[in-house]
């Protein structure tokens, strides 16, 4: 698998984000890791196309979004509903999503089935196993 240009991690837990980022960087998984604390902030970031293309250049849009499900303001399921509309723009068609949470409940299964751009789910353990799970989903 080739190195990704960038990954957006959407997670309200700073510790989880920093652990995931450390694993992504150390494993040379991607060139850049962005972070947003909830679905609404992530949508704001993704919608700011002109600014991000000017500042971030080839790292925007991210190739992958790692999405926590349980967050305040806008949770992962609400984000997916709104992100589906954003993906109608060709500029975002290549960005894929992996759900990232401590549990894999019925809602997670439904989101995987409902959205073609959701590759699957990886359990939140903050370890190398997470990266292996992400790699497997990207390669499938």
Image: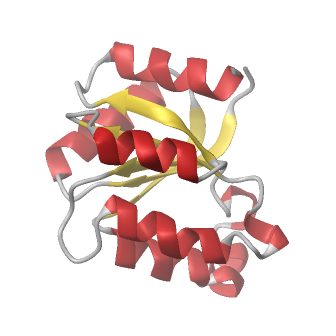
Placement of 71 over or under 17, stated as above or below? below
**Camera-side residue of 7 and 134:** 134
**Which residue is found at the position 73% from the left and 65% from the top?**
92
Quadrant the C terminus occupies: top right
Figure colour scheme:
secondary structure
Residue 107 place in picture, x, y as percent? 33, 48
Placement of 126 over or under 17, stated as above or below? above
**Camera-side residue of 53 and 93:** 93
Placement of 108 over or under 2, stated as above or below? below
Classify residue 103 as left or right of residue 56.
left
Residue 57 place in picture, x, y as percent? 73, 66
Residue 1 place in picture, x, y as percent? 72, 20
**Which residue is found at the position 21% from the left and 62% from the top?**
71
Tally of numbered discs: 0
Classify residue 49 as left or right of residue 101.
right
Placement of 20 over or under 131, stated as above or below? below
**Camera-side residue of 41 and 137:** 137
Classify residue 15 as left or right of residue 112.
left
**Which residue is found at the position 31% from the left and 41% from the top?**
106
**Which residue is found at the position 75% from the left and 59% from the top?**
58
Residue 103 place in picture, x, y as percent? 21, 34
């Amino acid at each position: 698998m080739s190195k990704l240009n960038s990954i957006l991690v959407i997670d309200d837990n700073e510790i989880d984000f920093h652990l995931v980022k450390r694993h992504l960087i150390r494993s040379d998984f991607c060139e850049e890791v962005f972070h947003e604390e909830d679905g609404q902030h992530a949508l704001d970031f993704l919608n700011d196309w002109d600014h991000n293309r000017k500042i971030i250049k080839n790292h925007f849009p991210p190739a992958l979004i790692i999405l926590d499900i349980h967050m305040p303001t806008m949770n992962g399921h609400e984000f997916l509903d709104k992100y589906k509309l954003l993906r109608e723009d060709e500029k975002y068609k290549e960005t894929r999503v992996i759900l990232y949470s401590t549990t894999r409940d019925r809602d997670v299964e439904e989101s995987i089935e409902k959205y073609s751009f959701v590759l699957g789910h990886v359990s939140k353990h903050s370890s190398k196993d997470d990266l292996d799970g992400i790699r497997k989903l990207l390669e499938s």
